[in-house]
Amino acid sequence: MSDFEDLMAFSHITAALGQIAGRLGWDQEAMMPRGAVEQRAEEMAALEGVLHARKADAKVGEWLSSIDDASLDGTGQAQMRLIRKDYVRSTKVPADLAAEIARVTSRSQGQWAQARADEDVKAFLPVLKEVVSLKRQEGQALADGGEVYDAMIGDYEPEMTAAELSIMFNALRPRLVDLRSKILQSGSPKELSGTFPEGVQMKLARKLARCFGYDMSHGRVDKVVHPFCSGSGLDVRITTRTNENDPFNCIYSTIHEVGHAAYEQGISRDYLLTPIGQGVSMGVHESQSRIYENQLGRSRAFTSWLFDEMTRAFGAFGISDAESFYGTVNRVHNGYIRTEADEVQYNLHIMLRFDLERALMDGNLQVKDLETAWNDRFCQDFGYRVDKPSNGCLQDVHWSLGLFGYFPTYSLGNVYAGCLYEKMRVAVSDLDTQLSRGDTRAATGWLRDNLQQHGSLRTPRETIMHASGAVPSSTPFLTYLETKFSELYRLT
């Protein structure tokens, strides 16, 4: 075997172990008994230690030095790019620090869930302080004297920086605030009301998952506190949640997570359990979940089909026709929860989190002051006060898991989705006709062929450029929002 073949065989085992670690994380949130938290923390730490040792193994460094990238084809060069990135990262972060982060974040997730249920911020702050301290140490090890938060962003969106994200947010904010102001001054569509049984919601959720191309023979749908997608290749699992007074929570969480799952399931099987056999970045990943959920799932065409499906599932539910239902689905309204936010206000929720977590990592905000900082910023941005912690700084699971740098990728995903949707509408000329029948195959097939199947073959920016034919820009996304909501709310 050549050195490259040896390296890929070694990497294959590392990737398989990484999938096992992911499955442990899925189990912790979806199935694990509450009393197993401490043991699971030790299991996660032990497995992280094994993974870190493999990624930083001196043999990997020797292979990377001996292999001439120019002798490889494009696929081989992409594999080398990602293995080298993992190797460099792992050699910078001490093994005991990596294991401790895995141990503490595993424990922290359970404490967050309990504190959220109890509306008790103080109960969560001690372990969050540990997480922040450990992640800051990790960021300092990776930053090489640069901004700690940039190193964290790089884990989720390679080649992206806080400065570049700030420029993007500064371009988005004024037009989003202006659009929101105009909408809130106009009449509002009818709000959904009634009781929607949990079992019926889950049955509809599974139907919608299949409708958007989720392969249930290689996946499953479960309920959790905070929906997520886990796995890649032949085992990709999604989760959702239910609220008997709000079926949209379940419906659109499911469609959103199916977007993530479809990306992983759509990657070429030739790349299975290799570095490029997974989504290239969280920004690109979010482009898939957001375009499935919003541009497709909340479109006038698709909601006309969904209205009939909901009527069959729940009976009459107070909305008279498909056009009224389209307005209800896309209703812009005050609310606290990011995952339930309408398309116009969603990115304002992200900007709040971006600024707060950047301040936490830079040391400009202390954990003990987080709740006050969150509540003050929320009131400033949205014009009303947070009523309880689960609607405020305890609503998201991300910080308990140490996922600092993740939040801005949601907005980046919206921007990427705008670019992709603009090209999709040209490529699929009868898109609305198909969606009105509940047929997403042309849309999801276009995404699979042009983006999903390639996994991490290209960099994130190159991935979007390859699929959309243009350099990523916020303009298509803003144009989409302004066109859709100006027509819906009859704005001048």
Image (tube, rainbow, N blue to C red):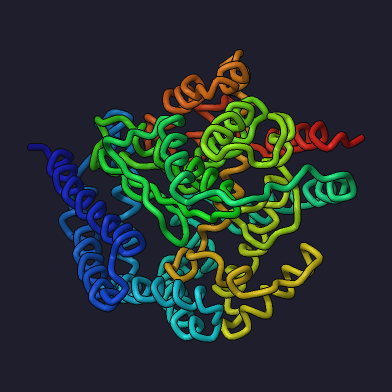
Q: Closest to the observer: 232 or 355?
A: 232
- Rendered-image quadrant of the N terminus: top left
Q: Closest to the observer: 125 or 273?
A: 125
| Residue 381 lies in quadrant | bottom right
Q: Can you give x and y, in whole percent of width and height, for residue 405 in the image?
A: 52, 61
Point 70% across, 59% down: residue? 335
Q: Can you give x and y, in whole percent of width and height, for residue 170 in the image?
A: 74, 53
Q: Can you give x and y, in whole percent of width and height, for residue 94 in the image?
A: 30, 72
User: Disc count in the image?
Assistant: 0
Residue 158 lies left or right of residue 387; in this view the side is left
- Residue furthest front as drawn: 315
- Residue furthest right as drawn: 492
- Rendered-image quadrant of the C terminus: top right
Whether residue 470 is visible here, answered yes or no, is no
Q: Can you give x and y, in whole percent of width and height, for residue 311 in the image?
A: 58, 34
Point 68% across, 47% down: residue? 192
Whether residue 411 is visible here, answered yes or no, is yes
| Residue 266 lies in quadrant | top left
| Residue 58 lies in quadrant | bottom left
Residue 441 lies left or right of residue 370; in this view the side is left
- Residue furthest top as drawn: 429
Q: Closest to the observer: 290 or 102?
A: 290
Residue 261 drawn above or below residue 22: above
Residue 213 lies left or right of residue 305; in this view the side is left
Residue 368 drawn above or below residue 178: below
Residue 297 lies left or right of residue 180; in this view the side is left
